[in-house]
Image (spheres, helix red, strand yellow):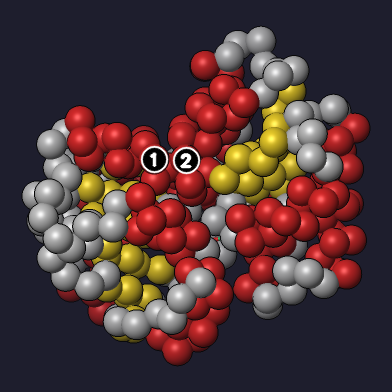
Amino acid sequence: MERPIGVFDSGVGGLTVVKQLSKILPNEQLIYFGDTARIPYGTKSKRLIQQFALEDALFLLQFNIKFLVVACNTASSSALEILIQRLTIPVEGVVEPGAQTAVQKTRNGRIGIIGTSATIKSSSYSKSILKLMPEAEVFGQPCPLLVPLVEEGWLDDEVTKMTLKKYLAPLMEQKVDTIILGCTHYPLLEKAIQQIVGPQVTLIDSGKETARVVKERLAALKLVNAGPKPNEDLYFVSDSARQFSQVGSRFLEKQLENVQRIDFDEFLIKHSDAPLLKNLEVLHEE
Ligand code: DGL
């Protein structure tokens, strides 16, 4: 089936997931929405993250997408359930695929999660892990300073290394043998993190695991595009296209083309009566 796959994130970070999807599903057209005007999601309340996720999904639905990938860990942690409830197409987030692999890889059952404050607060990864491995011990560590450091390109900088050491120390004290990189930006820090925690700790890239699961689900649902890629990937953002292209090229490790800024406020006003956005009062604070 030639219809595209929709992917959304709070900004540029979801391109780490796009990179993995493109590698494993080269014939699928991807349509990406990065909500760069409203990033970060990681510091926002559950209610707001859910509302934003529904709005982002609504934008992508215009393109007749056959499958939705929630690349953002924060949105996957707080809004996956409501997206699955309200959308008629299949949806995959990044939390469960990462949790599944962590459970397979751990030898001592002690698993660390690093992510935004909202992701850690939601306990989404712990819940998924404990469902699969009730005896596991899960330790969450919010790392709010890492997103800006990565976007700044300070991957190998002393400031980043010091920050990582401070964030990772409590996990190492707990003797975790597996750490989930529970944020779109962290795959860019994989080398630096591995150097700090040592080779005996397995790092799990949630985006990579998600791409694998999306491939399996497309096959199971008979949604695979058997022919060549029908069209180039498209990228939409709610703030500057230039800024997104510059930072995004580093995330994707290739030049970014086809980036368009959209007036998201105008889009939302125009679609304020969309059924997907009805009854938002059922979303509640947590
Ligand atoms: N994309 C977000 C995530 O994976 C990180 C950036 C943000 O806080 O919005 O959690």
Question: Would you identify the image quadrant in which residue 43 lies?
Answer: bottom right
- Three-letter code for the amino acid on which mark 2 is drawn: Glu
Please tell me which residue lies in front, 198 or 67.
Answer: 198
Q: Relative to 260, is 46 above or below? A: above
Task: Specify few, some or many for label 2: CA neighbours under 10 Å numbering under 14, 14-19, or 20 or more.
Answer: many
Q: Tell me if I can see residue 46 in this picture.
A: no
Disc 2 to disc 1, how far (Cα)?
5 Å
- Three-letter code for the amino acid on which mark 1 is drawn: Arg
Locate residue 137 relative to residue 63 in the image: left or right.
Answer: right
What residue is shown with label 2?
Answer: 209
Ligand 1 positioned in quadrant: bottom right
Image x and y of residue 199, in percent: 79, 40
Q: Quadrant of the C terminus?
A: top right
Name the secondary structure under disc 2.
helix
Labelled pair 2, 1 in contact (Cβ < 8 Å): yes
Please tell me which residue lies in front, 159 or 108.
Answer: 108
Q: Tell me if I can see residue 132 in this picture.
A: yes
Task: Specify few, some or many for label 1: CA neighbours under 10 Å numbering under 14, 14-19, or 20 or more.
Answer: some
Q: Relative to 170, is 131 above or below? A: above
Name the secondary structure under disc 1.
helix
